[in-house]
Image (cartoon, coloured by chain):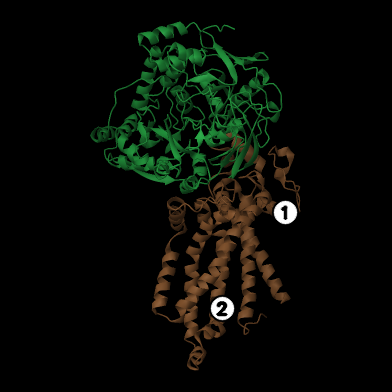
């Protein structure tokens, strides 16, 4: 178990190194300098050059990458926070500490001051959606998988496929028209702000609904296929022939076997929910991680982008690890060596 | 104290009585020359609707929330979007105020006087204005701010406005990478901006300039506390009605009312901007569920969706905001002025207005001077003429037209739609345009260097302000690289002519030059619109998109 954990952790670090370097390399080829974007359209070239110099954005790629790694690990102080640059970047935690993600050129704040709030907001949204997606998709998947091609299967399949094929922006607008404009019982945007006159809980209803509608049908389809496979197996036939009740057969024998493959799919939904909610967050003006990521990448705010990348990789590797543990519980035959 | 009256004012009154100039023109001229707005309106026999007369019987208290993008603000003298200016405006103020009718009044000034030759402007400061930290607002503050924006190292857009009467271009002696001499600029004399006493500042110009009061209302020309050296954030000092308590880019800005504000209001206790992101649907949804009390701007599509809401009032105002299709005259295809003229003839303006603005606009005439501008001279109108346009193209050596790339940005929506409609219309005269869309942030990197693009231009009360920024040779914002010695000379001449009749003669020639060989196709002037909850009182939509929260109140 310890070696397994060690392997997983070293894989995670390796992935992080590769991903973070890729982000640096890719933004190298993105047109438009950060200095120009900071100063806006009407700045003179001279001003842009001065700021580029201050931000040290002209250093070679590798120099900048290793400087970023050094700052992150706390090995060197963040050069941008040096008062002599005149950038006025100050971090209450100091310029040198482990986990220093640097300074966001977009928000003019330390990345650590921005990103965790946004991540917590998205985690709330994703968590609530996940709590609904799991039981809904299992129920839909199992019910339609019980009898392939039956009336129930056909009906549920149509529902699942219809919902999954509606993009988030369309279902978002549809729900807003219904519940905000025609029948005004819910707020139209979700800034998680008490001052708007709507309780926070009510602000979460529509974005969570959009995510659930978009995602649960897909997972249900996966479970259905897996369920159909299990239902054709000899031990199920035996159970049916010996007169076992459907309820006992499903919960005692079929479900556990049918969940092995969909389990991975379910865990993958966590990754999707954390970094793939951009559209939903945009529709509802939700102050989340996805919108931050979008704005940071449009602006070329590399410090924020890097932090977001590392966090996303960490989440992905963690869910994968949980997945491996879950396999062991679901299928005693799988043993991790 | 009896104010000395500018010697030209009696002539103006005479001209108005003879019908040579309109009442509006009289008001504009007379107030520019230092006659108070109240006096000018009374001479013209009109009621004074000006912004300084704020009703005092407004309900007090409450929190007002307006939906607007909250962008990063580095330095108030460098702001480049009305949204950024709208944030600073609640804390810091201008010396003058140009109202909805394009009439400019003193604001932090008590009054101004101008010499007969329009070269010496004496600005008298109000004596009852205090900074929030208790210090008296004085002439040193004004001199520091005016000198700061005139410094090329600061890079404020005020520099372009000052050039030609306070600021001169100089050769630095250095050369850039292409071998062209680098130019810089500086105040033409040490006493160009001069402190007379604690409450009086004098501008000594080397050329006559009539638009000084309007320049002082340009959206970056805030009076900042010199001690803060151009920085801005929560708690920043200001003379304005509010203190900013919180600012988070992409989220919100919060303000708390001052109790010792020198002017009228504020009536509300707190004020807030809420960032609703780039999705136009979010703003509609937020209005529908009353999460915001209004928006800083709403386009025609959004207005259509919201006008049926019972609690929403739609506000609109005709502006001199526009989008121009502009080309660099040094590019192969656009070298010949006949090509540029052919493109002007190839556009069906009414169709552009109907399609891109859903009807919310009036036709433009390709010279960037609007009928609502005081210096407007009506030239004969022309409509679309495909045959003539094709003939001009053939004469210029393009009998089969040509293909060309055009840079645009995806937002605002109306600007992008305008690009598409015009590109489609120009196909008919044989110009095949490939639209290359860049995200806004990247677009602004190339907005002056791209050979062919569509750019939005904001509202300005005088046409000569825009012409000086956008078409005078070698200006920082001259995106079309237009350079015409006759145009430059005429513009400088127009900037110094007071008599409206004389002046419009010069403007007529300027407009002709723009129509004959100018670098733009200008389809329309836009009607600017927004929405407010009906419970918001005192709101008047300003054509410059200026939000003035101290005038607004919330109905009980």
Name the spot of residue B40 as percent of width and height, x first: 47, 13
Left or right of B539 in this view: B333: left
- Rendering coords of residue B115 (x, y %): 54, 9
Q: Which chain contains the residue that carries disc 1?
A: A
Q: Quadrant of residue B87?
A: top right
- Residue A260's disc is 2
Residue A70 got which mark?
Answer: 1
The chain assigned the colour brown in the figure is A
Q: Among all residues in the image, which is located at the extreme front?
A: B556
Between B514 and B107, the one nearer to me in the picture: B107
Left or right? Give the position of B457 relative to B165.
Answer: left
**Residue drawn at the location 72% of the way across and 53% of the way down:** A70
Which class describes the residues within 10 Å of circle 1: few (<14), some (14-19), or many (20+)?
some
Q: Nearer the viewer, residue B197 or A99?
A: B197
Residue shown at 66% from the left, 18% from the top:
B139
Could you say where residue B398 lies in the image, as x and y percent from the top left? 29, 37
Asked whether residue B65 appears in the rendered view, the answer is yes
């Amino acid at each position: 178990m310890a070696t397994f954990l060690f392997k997983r952790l070293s894989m995670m670090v390796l992935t992080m190194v590769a991903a973070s370097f890729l982000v640096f390399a890719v933004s190298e080829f993105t047109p438009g300098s950060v200095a120009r974007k900071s100063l806006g359209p009407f700045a003179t070239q001279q001003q842009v050059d001065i700021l580029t110099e201050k931000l040290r954005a002209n250093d070679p790629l590798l120099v900048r990458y290793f400087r970023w790694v050094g700052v992150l690990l706390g090995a060197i102080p963040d050069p941008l926070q040096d008062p002599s640059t005149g950038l006025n970047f100050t971090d209450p935690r100091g310029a040198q500490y482990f986990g220093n993600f640097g300074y966001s050129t977009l928000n003019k704040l330390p990345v650590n001051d921005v990103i965790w709030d946004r991540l917590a907001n998205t985690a709330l949204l994703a968590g609530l959606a996940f709590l609904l997606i799991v039981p809904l998709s299992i129920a839909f998947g199992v019910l339609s998988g019980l009898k392939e091609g039956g009336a129930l299967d056909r009906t549920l399949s149509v529902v699942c496929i219809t919902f999954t094929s509606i993009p988030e922006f369309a279902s978002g607008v549809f729900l807003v028209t219904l519940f905000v404009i025609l029948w005004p019982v819910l707020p139209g945007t979700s800034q998680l702000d008490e001052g708007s006159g709507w309780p926070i809980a009510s602000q979460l209803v529509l974005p969570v609904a959009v995510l659930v509608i978009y995602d649960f049908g897909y997972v249900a389809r996966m479970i259905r296929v897996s369920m159909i496979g299990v239902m054709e197996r000899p031990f199920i036939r035996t159970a049916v022939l010996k007169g076992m009740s459907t309820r006992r057969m499903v919960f005692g024998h079929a479900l556990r076997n049918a969940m092995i493959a969909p389990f991975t799919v379910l865990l993958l939904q966590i990754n999707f929910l954390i970094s793939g909610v951009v559209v939903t967050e945009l529709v509802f003006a939700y102050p989340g991680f996805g919108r931050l990521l979008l704005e940071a990448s449009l602006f070329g705010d590399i410090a924020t982008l890097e932090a977001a990348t590392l966090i996303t990789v960490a989440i992905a590797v963690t869910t994968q690890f949980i997945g491996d543990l879950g396999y062991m519980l679901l299928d005693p035959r799988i043993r991790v060596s | 104290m009896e104010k000395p009256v500018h010697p030209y004012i009696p002539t103006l009154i005479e001209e108005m009585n003879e019908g040579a100039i309109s009442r509006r023109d009289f008001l504009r001229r007379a107030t520019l020359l230092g006659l108070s707005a109240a006096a000018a309106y009374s001479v013209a026999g009109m009621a004074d609707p000006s912004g300084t007369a704020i009703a005092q019987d407004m309900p007090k208290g409450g929190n007002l929330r307006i939906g607007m993008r909250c962008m990063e603000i580095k330095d108030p003298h460098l702001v480049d979007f009305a949204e950024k200016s709208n944030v600073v405006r609640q804390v810091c103020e201008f010396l003058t105020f140009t109202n909805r009718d394009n009439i400019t009044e003193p604001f932090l000034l008590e009054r101004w006087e101008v010499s007969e030759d329009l070269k010496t402007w004496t600005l008298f400061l109000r004596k009852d204005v205090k900074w929030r930290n208790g210090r008296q607002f004085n002439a040193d503050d004004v001199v520091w701010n005016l000198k700061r924006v005139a410094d090329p190292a600061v890079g404020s857009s005020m520099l372009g406005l000052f050039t030609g009467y306070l600021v001169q271009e100089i050769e630095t002696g250095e050369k850039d990478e292409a071998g062209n001499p680098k130019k810089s600029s500086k105040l033409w004399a040490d006493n160009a901006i001069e402190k007379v006493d604690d409450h009086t500042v004098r501008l000594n110009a080397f050329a006559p300039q009539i638009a000084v009061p309007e320049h002082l209302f340009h959206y970056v020309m805030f009076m900042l506390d010199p001690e803060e050296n151009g920085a801005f954030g929560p708690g920043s000092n200001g003379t304005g009605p509010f203190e900013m308590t919180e600012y988070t880019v992409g989220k919100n800005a919060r303000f708390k009312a001052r109790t010792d504000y020198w002017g009228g209001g504020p009536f509300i206790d707190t004020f807030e901007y809420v960032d609703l992101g780039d999705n136009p649907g979010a703003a509609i949804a937020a209005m529908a569920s009353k999460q915001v009390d209004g928006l800083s701007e709403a386009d025609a599509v959004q207005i259509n969706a919201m006008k049926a809401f019972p609690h929403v009032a739609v506000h609109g105002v005709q502006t001199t905001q526009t989008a121009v299709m502009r080309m660099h005259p040094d590019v192969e295809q656009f070298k010949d002025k006949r090509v540029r003229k052919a493109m002007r003839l190839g556009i069906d303006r009414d169709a552009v207005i109907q399609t891109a603005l859903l009807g919310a606009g009036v036709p433009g005439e390709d010279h960037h001077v609007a009928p609502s501008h005081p210096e407007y001279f009506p030239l004969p109108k022309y409509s679309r003429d495909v045959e003539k346009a094709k003939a001009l193209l053939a004469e210029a050596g393009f009998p089969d037209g040509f293909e060309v790339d055009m840079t645009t940005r995806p937002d605002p929506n109306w600007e992008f739609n305008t690009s598409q409609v015009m590109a489609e219309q120009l196909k008919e005269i044989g110009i095949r345009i490939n639209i290359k869309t860049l995200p806004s942030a990247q677009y602004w990197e190339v907005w002056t260097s791209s050979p062919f693009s569509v750019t939005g231009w904001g509202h300005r009360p005088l046409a000569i302000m825009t012409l000086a920024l956008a078409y005078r040779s070698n200006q920082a914002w001259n995106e079309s690289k237009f350079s015409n010695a006759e145009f430059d000379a005429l513009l400088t001449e127009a900037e110094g002519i007071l008599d409206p009749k004389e002046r419009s003669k010069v403007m007529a020639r300027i407009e002709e030059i723009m129509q004959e060989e100018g670098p733009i196709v200008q389809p329309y002037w836009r009607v600017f619109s927004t929405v407010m909850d009906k419970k918001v009182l005192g709101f008047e939509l300003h054509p410059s998109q200026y939000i003035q929260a101290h005038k607004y109140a919330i109905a009980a």
